Image: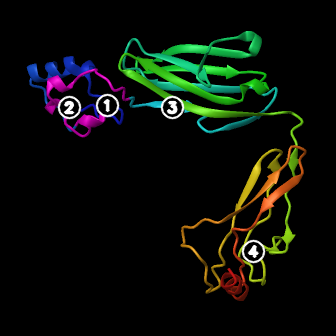
Amino acid sequence: EFQTEYLLCDCNILWMHRWVKERNITVRDTRCVYPKSLQAQPVTGVKQELLTCDPPLELPSFYMTPSHRQVVFEGDSLPFQCMASYIDQDMQVLWYQDGRIVETDESQGIFVEKNMIHNCSLIASALTISNIQAGSTGNWGCHVQSKRGNNTRTVDIVVLESSAQYCPPERVVNNKGDFSVAVGSLRPFCLRLSRWPRTLAGITAHLQCTRNTHSGGIYPGNAQDERKAWRRCDRGGFWADDDYSRCQYANDVTRVLYMFNQ
């Protein structure tokens, strides 16, 4: 028995397949996990002609860390690691920024450590972006390349100036309601919306209008209809344009009168 969650049934196990049959060895409950076309089939029951190394490329393990969008400041350092199943000798791990290949460039603070092999089963590469500058903003990708095909993992990097401006958190009272109340309050004439969060200059913030579950009121639309207000933080760090029109009144009477007047 040699079951693993990464067991790849391809041309690389042909020798084992023949050896088991020639020596009449019993293999207990060992099934293919990859490729998907052979998933759950007993290893010894797969026809030899199906054990190929043809495209498409299916990697039992492939990950890049960090894997989510990174928001960093100028001057920061950001390390990445990429690791994939090592299934072909011609495999390479390459790095790209916005579709352009990335190589070590000490003058730009970029360092790439290429194609490290771990235990003959994983291929890895490391990328370090030190002293990050505005030009590092963009889509960065780890690209695995082999004769069977290619596979890519990407993450976005957003670089902020050290002196970046923010709009402060704020509660709002306007002609449509009091936005300083807590979500779920029963005060009349108010919208169910929490306060606006601290927001980076140049970004538009959105808040979902939450329906009052304590009221038996009438709302247009269905339960999945997500209504949101938005508010823009300008480049100077001041709250600017906004739109609350999609939010409904929380008070039943006010809301129904509003609907009849439409």
Task: Inspect this view and state whether residue 31 appears.
Answer: no
Crowding around mark 2 (Cα neighbors within 10 Å: few <14, some 14 to 19, many 20+) is many
Q: Do tag 1 and tag 2 residues touch (Cβ < 8 Å)? A: yes
Foreground disc of the pair 4, 2: 4
Q: Is residue 237 left or right of residue 28?
A: right
Write the start and end of the magenta stretch as one range. Answer: 30-58
Q: Disc 2 residue type?
A: Val
Q: Do tag 4 and tag 2 residues touch (Cβ < 8 Å)? A: no
Q: Do tag 2 and tag 3 residues touch (Cβ < 8 Å)? A: no
Mark closest to the chain's N terminus, 3 or 1: 1
Residue 191 is tagged as: 4
Q: Do tag 4 and tag 1 residues touch (Cβ < 8 Å)? A: no
Foreground disc of the pair 4, 1: 4
Q: According to the image, label 2 marks what residue? A: 43
Residue visible at 13% across and 26% down in the picture: 25
Mark closest to the chain's N terminus, 2 or 3: 2
Q: Disc 1 residue type?
A: Leu
Foreground disc of the pair 3, 1: 3
Q: Secondary structure at mark 3?
A: strand
Mark closest to the chain's N terminus, 4 or 3: 3
Residue visible at 20% across and 17% down in the picture: 15
Crowding around mark 4 (Cα neighbors within 10 Å: few <14, some 14 to 19, many 20+) is many
Residue farthest along the bottom direction in this orientation: 253
Q: Disc 4 versus disc 2: distance between alpha carbons? A: 61 Å
Q: Is residue 120 left or right of residue 192?
A: left
